[in-house]
Image (tube, grey):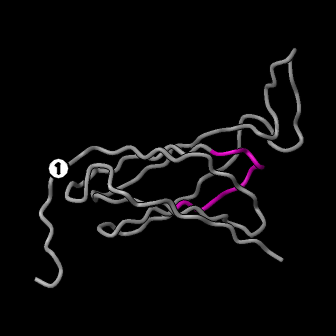
């Protein structure tokens, strides 16, 4: 059985529902489970969706490595690394969908930190009026 893994982050507006944000980048912290690629898709109701590749890997081999000097491990199977990806567009919302590019490739995302600049209040037409 092939596993197609994916998840989508929440979409709460960091500056409020009536404030636009100019999104610049997202720092993604992940566990090194091997060297492979995941698809990284940014989604927003006001901006066209865009997909990028996130190359997952680290400075050391991530699987089966247990090398240490003294008592301080240099790398192991729980190594955490990060990658920066560009974001685009102005919108109060931005959610991220991450999916393994090939079936049966394990990935573990620990944290996503999105960077933005508050553009300010924007009038939005209410539906039905």
Q: Secondary structure at mark 1?
A: strand
For disc 1, the neighbor class at 10 Å (few under 14, some 14 to 19, many from 20) is few
Q: Position of residue 109 (x, y in %)?
A: 63, 50
Residue ranking furthest to the top: 70
Question: Does residue 104 appear to the left or right of 65 in the view shown?
Answer: left
Q: Is residue 36 magenta?
A: yes
Q: Main secondary structure of the magenta part?
A: strand
Residue range highlighted in magenta? 30-40
Image quadrant where residue 91 sits:
bottom left
Q: Which residue lies at the image location 67% right of the left edge and 64% below the top edge?
A: 100
Which residue sits furthest bottom? 128
Which residue sits at x=77%, y=35%? Answer: 60
Residue 46 in the image: state x and y as whole percent: 29, 68
Q: Residue at x 60, y 40 (%)?
A: 82
> Residue at point 40% right, 53% down?
87
Q: Quadrant of the N terminus?
A: bottom right
Would you name the residue on which mark 1 appears? 120
Closer to the camera, 110 or 87?
110
Image quadrant holding the C terminus, namely: bottom left
In the image, 115: left or right of 108?
left
Q: Position of residue 79 (x, y in %)?
A: 74, 37
């Amino acid at each position: 059985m092939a596993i197609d893994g994916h998840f989508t982050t929440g979409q709460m507006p960091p500056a409020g529902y009536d404030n636009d944000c100019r999104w610049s980048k997202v720092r993604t912290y992940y566990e090194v489970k091997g060297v492979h690629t995941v698809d990284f898709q940014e989604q927003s109701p006001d901006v066209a969706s865009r997909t990028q590749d996130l190359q997952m890997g680290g400075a050391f081999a991530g699987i089966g490595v247990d090398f240490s000097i003294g008592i301080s491990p240099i790398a192991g199977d729980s190594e955490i690394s990060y990658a920066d990806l560009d974001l685009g567009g102005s919108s109060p919302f931005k959610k991220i969908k991450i999916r393994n590019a090939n079936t049966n490739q394990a990935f573990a995302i620990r944290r996503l930190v999105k960077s933005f600049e508050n553009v300010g209040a924007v009038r939005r037409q209410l539906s039905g009026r």
